[in-house]
Image (tube, rainbow, N blue to C red):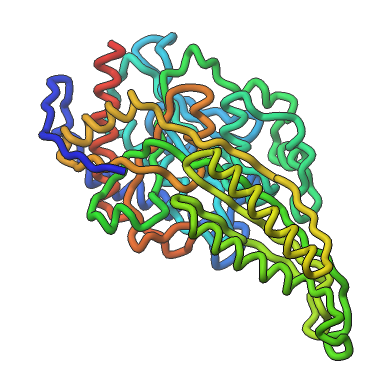
Amino acid sequence: MSCDQGSTLPDPTMSLSDVNFSKLALEALERCRVLARFSEEPGRLTRTFLSPPMRAVHESLTGWMRELGMAVRTDAVGNLIGHYPGHSPDAPLFLLGSHVDTVRDAGAYDGPLGVTLALALIKGLGGKRLPLALEVIAFSEEEGVRFGMPFLGSKAVTGQFEPDPLRLKDAQGQTVEEAIRAFGLEPAHIPQAAYNPAQVKGFLEFHIEQGPVLEALGYPLGLVEGIVGQSRLEVAFRGQAGHAGTTPMHLRKDALAGAAEWMVLVEREAREEQGLVATVGMITALPGAANVIPGEVQMSLDVRHPYDEVRSLAVANLVTRAQQVAQRRGLELDYRTLYEQAAVPCDPELNERLALSAQAQGYPVHRMVSGAGHDAMIMSALCPSTLLFLRSPGGLSHHPEESVWPQDAEAALRVGLDFLHRLAAEAG
């Protein structure tokens, strides 16, 4: 990580003085709060892939896009896309956007802010057409909550959507294919959602940082140079259920005790490797009664690191540790890998343009790595892609109290509009 602050770089192509950035920023934040009303659960925000509240999100976004003169379409995996034409019908595309699904009990800004800020940028153009056509994508799925697999939306856009996920089931037994049909879409048309790489010049995603780094430094924005790789596993310890009062301690095969020992090892091993994070975020003890020794424990394991080799070695080591715990305690161990995502660098040329724009608008350029996965990492398979982080007050994310300061949203818009003008000058 590094921070460099250059002097303002004047650009004769820029004409931002007439743009009311403060008003645009407040509107973008308010629109996030509007979308946060559409939830599957009363009293808290939960909105998963193609759930009923997603229709209301699409309706609101469609209205806002059409107000800007955008043509709106929905692809076969439920991505909502607004098209803002360029100078000519064959103008190359530049893409902006983020996801509009959420985790359970979410905050209002993780994901949707990247969509509302993108629309604010287009509004800031004041109807001006560029040598580039702009498209804003509201990805239907990024979090992986409903079906256990993330990035369904951006994988369709990049042509990486495979048939296997269509058979995945949610907690109610509905498959991805059935969910798509229930939303009025046709799964057979998913291949048509893929963009032609020859027509796409790049992708920019605005996102809250989801961490405390920018706030600690006092910076409103962070320029993301890369996104860490991630492994997600399902791990199960199996022993023998028994009566909690009549089974002596030395004769027990307690699956939960074994799982607990291993979870402490996961934490210890991760702390000893610089840059490594490992999390057991879900745990289910069966049969789940106060007076019964747990006979089975099912857990998730999430491992992340900027370097794939380090991550792979860490996963192998943690699995070995689990096997050792199980053998010592007379338990059985099962595990399977649910998801693997390689580390992805952001595009250096787009980042240098963003850095110039930040400097021109008087903001420091802080370069950092994202510890969380984002649609931008998937989009990098299609076109040059990058991320611009906004400060997360309190470091909160995936939390109902996550927030964004208006001045940071304004900073993102100033840098973003400067960036679009620079792209336009080069394309023209």
Q: Is residue 221 left or right of residue 54?
A: left
Where, by quadrant of the figure, is residue 250 drawn? bottom right
Q: Position of residue 30 (x, y in %)?
A: 37, 52
Q: Position of residue 63 (x, y in %)?
A: 46, 38
Residue 84 visible in the shown view = no
Is residue 96 depicted above or below 23 in this figure?
above
* Quadrant (top left/top right/bottom left/bottom right) for the N terminus: top left
* Quadrant (top left/top right/bottom left/bottom right) for the C terminus: top left
Q: Is residue 40 left or right of residue 239?
A: left
For the residue pair 44 and 69, the one nearer the viewer reads as 44
Q: Position of residue 378 (x, y in %)?
A: 54, 32
For the residue pair 276 and 382, the one nearer the viewer reads as 276
Residue in the picture at 45% in, 55% down: 108
Where, by quadrant of the figure, is residue 293 drawn? bottom right
Q: Is residue 259 left or right of residue 24?
A: right
Residue in the picture at 44% in, 32% down: 345
Q: Position of residue 319 (x, y in %)?
A: 69, 53
Residue in the picture at 34% in, 12% down: 87
Residue 160 visible in the shown view = yes
Q: Is residue 391 left or right of residue 190?
A: left
Is residue 212 depicted above or below 95 in this figure?
below
For the residue pair 412 and 130, the one nearer the viewer reads as 412
For the residue pair 280 and 199, the one nearer the viewer reads as 280
Q: How many marks?
A: 0
